[in-house]
Image (spheres, rainbow, N blue to C red):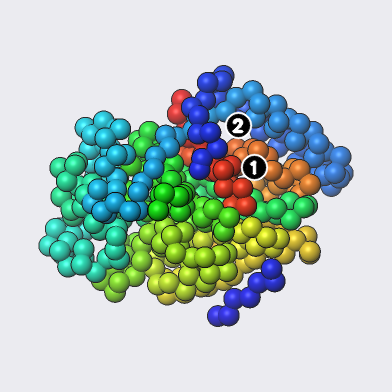
Amino acid sequence: MKVEFGFCSLAQEASAGPQWCDIRQITEPLQASHFAHKENGDELLAPVFVLLWAGVWAAASPPAPPLFNVSLDAAPELRWLPVLRRFDLDALRTAMAHILGNKVPRWVHALMGKAVGELARLLPPPFTDEIRGMCQVLDYSLADCLLLNLAYESTAFCTSIVAQDSRGHIYHGRNLDYPFENFLNKLTVDVQFIKNGKVAFTGTTFVGYVGLWTGQSPYKFTVSGDERDKGWWWENVIAALFQRHYPISWLIRTTLSESENFEAAVYKLAKTPLIADVYYIVGGTSPREGVVITRNRNGPADIWPLDPLNGAWFRVETNYDHWKPAPKKDDRRTPAIKALNATGQANLSLETLFQVLSVFPVYNNYTVYTTVMTAASPEKYMTRIRNLG
């Protein structure tokens, strides 16, 4: 398939303000009174929506995660040690044991125990060495640490949005939803990856996990990944790993590290063989540089770019193919689209995008964190931890 295009920190302060309210108490009446009258003209109602959200934003904000530097100039085995030292290792082991026990089938444990040496040899560097270094600190086997990292590759139900405002600025936001939110919201960290004394790229991840589902290459592009569930996950993953296919989140991190611009990132994310299907959402720095890539394991199933000249100034991706209806039991797409239309292209900003991602059920009981970012202004990268109450 030929792909053509015409086209962290933020202060990272822990919130000292009022306790974050349950945003659903605000959005439910808004959905009833505002969205039901869309046919009467969004242009009359959008200012009300924006003013409401501005008040919420100013009054209360959920906390930022800790910010760490990880040096890519250090040996891979040593890179994550400064992060681990800041956490309670017993609590980390408890969280890891819970996730492994609930996410990994017994037959996978048995297989990994026998094949870990061969698999470690096949996996792309430097990830295995980074995992090995963390295992030594945590007193975990390499097999279990690899399984933990693979467990995070599945069941990440998410919402990602890439959008262009009326001045041509590109904004990118995402919610990451995961069943273990009570553990993961305490393990969420923002990481600046440092090379030659400079920030090479920034991402949000979990302690003990070397991949990135969310990240930014400064002045180049932003990326998020959303799961595309096709069933038989572990069977497919194990087979693909032995074919040297990339884990989904490892490819995001590699792309952030290696790709020089938006188009190079899109090509790499679209073409590199993967262990599982996924949606990659990419934002650039110039008008029209936004795209949703629907991936099969071996290549792209669909490329869905922004088309602002024809009214498509945003793209919303949850966990379902965009050309198919979202299932009624899990329709986060429609509320996100309604909230974006109510906001309006002229009012788009990182703040209003954050509030779109706070509309129920886009934001829900499984939401671990929300990130908003714009590669043209990398200092504005912002993550907030959700559901801490």
Label 2's element? helix
In the rendered structure, which amino acid carries the disc numbered 2? Arg
Q: Is residue 76 above or below residue 121?
A: above
* Residue nearest the viewer, comparing 283 with 160: 283
Q: Is residue 326 left or right of residue 101?
A: right
Q: Residue furthest bottom?
A: 1
Counting from the top left corner in percent of width and height, residue 276 is at 39, 65
Q: Residue furthest left?
A: 114
Q: Is residue 289 visible?
A: yes
Q: In the rendered view of the protein, which quadrant contains the N terminus?
A: bottom right
Which residue is tagged 1?
350
Q: Is residue 381 above or below residue 89?
A: below
Q: Residue furthest front?
A: 196
Residue at x-position 65% and y-position 66%: 305
In the rendered structure, which amino acid carries the disc numbered 1? Leu
Label 1's element? helix
Labels 1 and 2: the sequence-earlier one: 2
Counting from the top left corner in percent of width and height, residue 332 is at 59, 48
Residue at x-position 58% and y-position 80%: 2
Residue at x-position 48% and y-position 39%: 369
Residue 222, numbered circle? none
Q: Is residue 266 visible?
A: no
Which residue is tagged 2?
24
* Residue nearest the viewer, comparing 324 with 262: 262
* Residue nearest the viewer, comparing 273 with 156: 273
Counting from the top left corner in percent of width and height, residue 197 is at 41, 49
Counting from the top left corner in percent of width and height, residue 347 is at 76, 43
Q: Is residue 308 left or right of residue 267?
A: right
Give the CA distance from mark 1 to mark 2.
Answer: 20 Å
Within 10 Å of disc 2 (Cα), the crowding (few <14, some 14-19, many 20+) is: some
Looking at the rendered image, the disc whose residue lies closer to the viewer, 1 or 2, is: 1
Residue at x-position 35% and y-position 53%: 72
